Image (cartoon, helix red, strand yellow):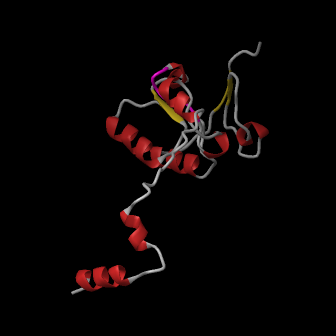
Amino acid sequence: MLAPTLVLDARDDLALMRDEIFGPILPLVPVDSVDAAIDYVNARPRPLALYHFDHDRARTERVLERTVAGGVSINDTVLHFAQNELPFGGIGPSGMGHYHGHDGFLTFSKQKPVLFQARWSGMAFMRPPYRRLADLLVRFLTR
């Protein structure tokens, strides 16, 4: 069992910063502003999860509008995963699709769309070889 661990001033060249983390390790990267944090996130592969801690609604909305992540928790961590009614899944390198509830059913299901064309259909007039009726229709529609 690994105790929760904070990695302060985590450098980009660390393996910890290049691979997805599935464990109690949290790298902390200092930034000067929310915009710098947004730029930092957007300069890297899309994360599976994004955790934003802030009680300023305008800043939170800015983060949500300008970043892309598989899931987001505001003022908490990991709990978006535990909500069965919220779809969970990654985007890009962190995976594709949604898992949980109805969204999970749709992700792991493949619909089979089928179109049956009627034996006698108006579409027959739109296929070659074109005959006199097609000429009449074109003349009527373009007059």
Classified by dominant secondary structure, the portion drawn in magenta counts as loop
Q: Position of residue 51 (x, y in %)?
A: 52, 31
Q: Residue shown at 58%/38% (left/top)?
A: 110
Q: Residue shown at 63%/49% (left/top)?
A: 44
Residue 51 in view here: no
Q: Residue shown at 70%/23% (left/top)?
A: 23
Q: Residue shown at 39%/45% (left/top)?
A: 62
Q: Nearer the viewer, residue 44 or 90?
A: 90
Residue 57 forms part of the magenta stretch = no
Q: Residue furthest left?
A: 143
Q: Position of residue 106 (x, y in %)?
A: 53, 33
Q: Nearer the viewer, residue 87 or 132?
A: 132
Q: Position of residue 81 (x, y in %)?
A: 54, 24
Image position of 53 (left or right of 57): right
- Tell me if residue 102 comes above or below residue 121 in the rendering: above
- Tell me if residue 14 comes above or below residue 103 in the rendering: below
Residue 18 in view here: yes
**Where is the C terminus found, in terms of image quarters?**
bottom left
User: Where does the magenta region start and end?
Assistant: 84-89
**Where is the N terminus found, in terms of image quarters?**
top right
Q: Position of residue 113 (x, y in %)?
A: 51, 45
Q: Quadrant of residue 141?
A: bottom left
Image position of 140 (left or right of 123): left
Tally the marks. 0
Q: Nearer the viewer, residue 109 or 121?
A: 121
- Tell me if residue 70 comes above or below residue 132 in the rendering: above
Q: Residue furthest top?
A: 1
Image position of 73 (left or right of 93): left
